[in-house]
Amino acid sequence: MLYFVANFYLNVQLLKMMKFQGSHILSVSQFDRDAIAKILNVSAQMAPYASRQKRCHVLDGAILSNLFFEPSTRTRVSFGTAFNLLGGFVRETVGQENSSLSKGESLFDTAQVISGYSDVIAMRHPQMHSVEQFAQGSTVPVINGGDGANEHPTQALLDLFTIQSEMMHFNKGLDNLNIVLMGDLKHGRTVHSLSKLLSLYNNVKVTMVSPKELQMPDSVISTLTNAGHQVIVTDTMAGNLSCDVIYQTRIQQERFASKDEADLYRGHFSLNKSVYKQYCQENTVIMHPLPRDSRPEANELDIDLNDLDNLAIFRQAQNGVLVRMALFALTLGVEEQLTAYEKPVNWFTNKNR
Ligand code: CP
């Protein structure tokens, strides 16, 4: 335990000194504003490679182990895509039932073995703090792809990158942001991580709209209020959605004891065009970490919003590739070498037109 605390503290200090190389990425608490600015800047540098204007093979020969012990589409595939876009190889394990964790092997032993096969590891697991536990056994950097209801640091970073990009159109930044977080704020790890990151900026107003039973954990609210930000906690949409950004979330059924219990809360805070026009500002940007639950009983983000320019959800998901490329470049220490390893794109692509 002492080793774990010392190791985690060391990583936090290393990142705070902007030394990403060789460090685990386990929690957004590791970052200060300078570190975030560095990540967002390197993310922006990845755009020509992600849009296939150029290739970059700076990670030629490197191996990512992508371990997903809980379902995922975006995080798993974008981690893999990001690594491939930098020239590296990806080895995947999907589902605990396909791994020797199902035979009783510990996270520590798994980490000792897999880190011997890899240069970096991305991991998702249903248990809170499991990725930290795994990192204790790893000899290579481990990036948290979501640990239960605890944190989803790379999602929060891509959310911040998205907010910054979207706000730029309105000559705004991350300071003085007025944001609404809505839905299952108790179990939604993305909003936990995002709130902690927002606490680092100036004069942020956060309105938290959820059923009373699914309110944001007090510890997350305190992080914002202790930093001097305005937090409104409410279970009412009317009069509370006038903001720069509305960030909708899904009822996290997998964190409830049963589907019946989750069903009690489904569909209470559906955002559709009528609600948007009535309560949001003209230019309110709509975000959602996805997946959105489009079943009629949930319908938390109606497809009638799809034709709005301010619906940023798919731009947000694409930004995940840029941010994850940046995190690989930083943790593997190649962020200054990108241009030296560029190549032209030889095949037909409509991505760069
Ligand atoms: N946003 C997100 O984490 O999506 P996936 O569960 O599909 O990875």
Image (cartoon, rainbow, N blue to C red):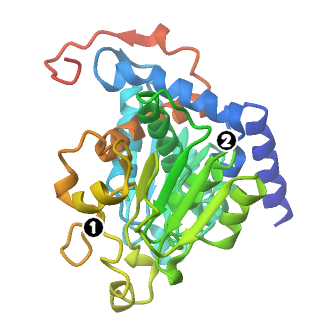
Neighbour tally class for label 2: few under 14, some 14-19, many 20 plus, Cα within 10 Å: some
Q: Residue at x 65, y 45 (%)?
A: 24
**Mark pair 1, 2: CA separation:** 31 Å
Q: Amino acid at mark 2?
A: Tyr
Viewer-proximal residue among 303 and 34: 303
Whole-percent x, y for residue 298 in the image: 27, 74
Q: Disc 1 vs disc 2: Cβ atoms closer than 8 Å? A: no
* Ligand 1's quadrant: bottom left
Q: Is mark 2 within 8 Å of ligand 1?
A: no
Residue 37 x %, y %: 62, 30
Give the label, 1 or 2, closer to the camera. Answer: 2
Task: Tell me residue 338's x, y (percent).
Answer: 49, 15
- Residue located 66% across and 64% down the image: 220
329 is higher (above) or lower (below) than 192: above
Residue carrying label 1 = 293
Residue 324 visible to the viewer: no
Secondary element at image label 1: loop
Residue 156 relative to residue 292: left or right: right
